[in-house]
Image: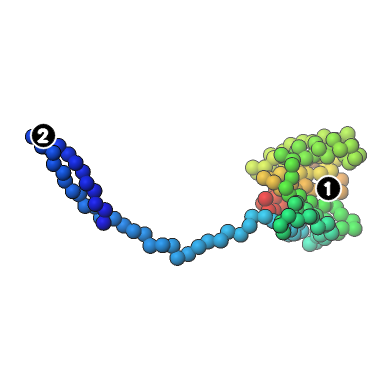
Amino acid sequence: MVLLLAAGCSSGGDDSASTTILPSTTLPPSSTSTTLPPRSVTEVDVCALLNETELTTVLDDAGAGEAAEVEEAETDGGVPAFVAGSCSWPSAADPALVLSYLAPTTAPSGPQHLEDVLATDTGFAEGGQVVPRETGSQTVGLLLDDEQMLREVAVVKRSALLYLIVNQDVSGRDEDALTAYSQLLVAALVRAPR
């Protein structure tokens, strides 16, 4: 019980004191505890980020995809400095599409990643341009080469970068195809660790 003392003055000027007793509640100690797992991702199965039904919108007979060998990243206390992975469809030997994942990334957006690719002067899509496109709630970057053919699609969410290299003849003027590739990458992003 809690005991409160209050002092007050009566109308006659005499000092008087009154006592008020209030009930109290005591909560029992917690008998459960929660342990949160670490939020660090140590590997990613890139082939599992897309399913065959989604792939059929851009590729006939895609199959399950083939994961590329990835070098082990240096670890700091069991957590790798970065996580990377790649998957090719229909095969690694003859890829029509290559989906890659990298985290953490320094690129603030998919279009900026593609601008950085163009700036590296490797000859990939030389003379090309980056076209940003809103797909769902994501800003996707489309890299068109100097012949207006789609070469790469990229998106960034939080610390994860996903990019899709397109080894097919896809015109940058084909709005339906550009939408299909953008939606495909966003579908992978939804499943990717971020």
Query: Does residue 11 show up?
Result: no
In front here: 20 or 138? 20
Q: Is residue 15 left or right of residue 128?
A: left
Where residue 68 sits, quadrant-wise, is bottom right
Q: Looking at numbered disc 1 in the image, what kind of residue is underneath it? A: Val
Depth check, mark 1 against mark 2: the one in front is 2
Query: Does residue 37 show up?
Result: yes
Q: Residue furthest left?
A: 12
Bin the neighbour count of mark 2 within 10 Å (Cα to Cα): few under 14, some 14-19, many 20 and up.
few
Q: Residue at x 87, y 58 (%)?
A: 92
Above or below, 63 relative to 101: below
Where residue 54 sits, quadrant-wise, is bottom right
Where residue 70 sits, quadrant-wise, is bottom right
* Residue placed under numbered mark 2 in the picture: 13
* Residue placed under numbered mark 1 in the picture: 166
User: Along the polypeptide, which appears first: circle 1 or circle 2?
Assistant: 2
Q: Residue at x 16, y 44 (%)?
A: 17
Pick the quarter of the image with the N terminus. bottom left
Q: Secondary structure at mark 1?
A: strand
- Dot label at residue 175: none
Distance CA(mark 1)–CA(mark 2) = 93 Å
Residue 184, horizontal then vertical, whole percent? 73, 50
Above or below, 157 relative to 131: below
Q: Residue at x 77, y 40 (%)?
A: 113
In front here: 115 or 93? 115
Q: Residue at x 75, y 56 (%)?
A: 75
Q: Looking at numbered disc 2 in the image, what kind of residue is underneath it? A: Gly
Q: Is residue 187 left or right of residue 88?
A: left
Q: Secondary structure at mark 2?
A: loop
